[in-house]
Image (spheres, rainbow, N blue to C red):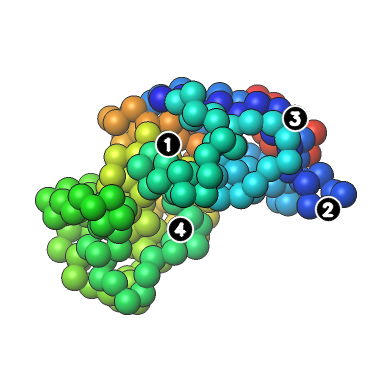
Amino acid sequence: MTLQVQDLAKHYGDAAVFEHVSLEVAAGEFVAIVGESGVGKSTLLNCMAGLDSWDAGSIRHDGVALATLDDEARALWRRRQVGFVFQAFHVLPHLDVAQNVALPLMLLGDIDAARVQQMLSIVGLEGLGERLPQQLSGGQLQRVAIARALVHRPSLLLADEPTGNLDPTTAGRVMDVLVQQTREHGASLVLVTHSEAAAARADRVLHLRADGIAS
């Protein structure tokens, strides 16, 4: 499945966040997006996930134009096809680690305890499934967020500064998991980052500016 963004524009009032943004990400491809702070990298990622609106242009995933989907259909598309890794983790404090990871499967009505345990093992959290988030380090929490984003094998993986709060060793492990899962399952990975080390792992690095995007 391919992600296609064509001539996308986003404004806040009269101020343009970005304009004329076009890019394409193939299945199994890893694209990193870099750019100065405030240029709209996270906003662009939110648009790709259908979480934010845009003012011009189009976003298509596997030929489906997101703008043609109503809220319910877009939520269902996101639930089935998208894995989102937030910089701030967004784990639920009242659920244990395994329950947090299982959330996408719960929403799809397809609980698979073995798959959850497999993902915990892949991200190096085996044996920690019954712990609560407040008992984990920041690096462990980010790996919970990644396991949750990957557990339902999404075809589109979006990651917003996933290594921004991590030490270099943990950041490297996180990137290993993201890249390995992308290649293994043929997902399209779009990563927003300030990290040169993370961007260096990508197949392509694109630079977002207010007037568009450049390689």
Is the residue marked by circle 4 packed among few (<14), some (14-19), or many (20+) residues within 10 Å?
some
Total label count?
4
Distance, label 1 to label 3, CA atoms, is: 22 Å
Q: Nearer the viewer, mark 3 or mark 4?
A: 3
> Quick one: label 2, few (<14), some, or many (20+) residues within 10 Å?
few
- Identify the residue under disc 1: 156
Pick the front one: 82 or 148: 82
Q: Residues within 10 Å of mark 1 (few under 14, many from 20)?
A: many
Mark identifier at residue 29: none
- Residue wearing tag 4: 166
* C-alpha gap between disc 1 and disc 4: 23 Å
Q: Position of residue 147 (x, y in %)?
A: 30, 52
Cα–Cα gap, marks 2 and 1 = 30 Å
- Discs 4, 2 touching: Cβ within 8 Å: no
Q: Type of residue at label 1?
A: Leu
| Residue 206: x %, y % from top left | 62, 30
Task: Determine the secondary structure under disc 3.
Answer: strand
- Circle 2 or circle 1, nearest the eye: 2
Mark 3 or mark 4, which has the lower sequence index?
A: 3
Name the mark on residue 20.
3
Q: Provide the residue designation for mark 2.
A: 13
Residue for point 37% across, 57% down: 145
Residue at the spot 52% in from the left edge and 49% down from the top edge: 71
For badge 2, the amino acid type reads Gly
- Residue 27: quadrant of the picture: top left
Which quadrant of the rendered structure holds the N terminus?
A: top left
In the rendered image, the residue lying farthest to the right is 14
Q: Amino acid at mark 3?
A: His
Kind of residue at disc 4: Leu
Please tell me whether residue 176 is drawn above or below residue 146 in the rendered image: above
Q: Earlier in the sequence, mark 1 or mark 4?
A: 1
Name the residue rendered at 17%, 58% in the picture. Answer: 126
